[in-house]
Amino acid sequence: MNEAAIINLLEILAAKKALFWDKQEIDPSKDGHVIAERILEFGTEEDVKALIACYGEPFIINIIRDSRALSPKTVNYYALRFHVQREETRCFSDASHRIWQPF
C-alpha cells in the first residue's frame, strides 16, 4: 500500500466515523474488507478513488464478487464499472432466495 494513499484513506475514515459506528479502531491493513464494503455502499466517488488508490482494483473487484453485505444496486453499478459479469458476483449468483431479479 502506498503511504500517501493510506494517509488519504485515514483522513476519509476520520471524516466518515458514522460508517464505522460498530468498530472501535479501524486499521486499514486488517479491516480492508469492511472499509471497502462500507465505502462502496455509502461513500462518494472521491472516497472510492481513494479506496482504489490504497488497495488497488483487484482487491475491490474481489470485494464486489464475494461480498454479501453490498446491496444489489451497488454490486450492479460496480460490476458494470469494473467489467465484472453479474453472474460472477455472490450477490447475483446466490439469488435463490429471490423470486425475481430486480436488476
Image: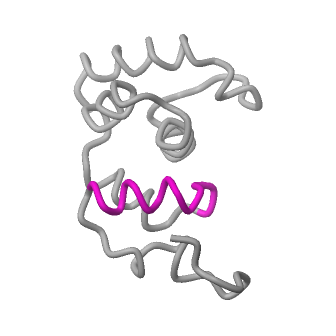
Please provide percent x and percent y for residue 32: 47, 41
Q: Which of 9 and 83 is in front in this view?
A: 83
Q: Give the range drawn in magenta.
A: 68-81
Taking 78 as reference, is 25 above or below it? Answer: above
Please provide percent x and percent y for residue 65: 43, 67
Residue 27 in magenta? no
Taking 92 as reference, is 14 above or below it? Answer: above
Taking 79 as reference, is 100 above or below it? Answer: below
Q: Which residue is drawn at 47% across and 42% down?
A: 40
Secondary structure mostly taken by the magenta-highlighted segment of the chain? helix
Please provide percent x and percent y for residue 76: 43, 62
Q: Residue at x 30, y 61 (%)?
A: 80
Q: Residue at x 42, y 81 (%)?
A: 87
Q: Residue at x 70, y 81 (%)?
A: 98
Residue 70 lies in what quarter of the image? Answer: bottom right
Left or right: residue 29 compared with residue 98: left
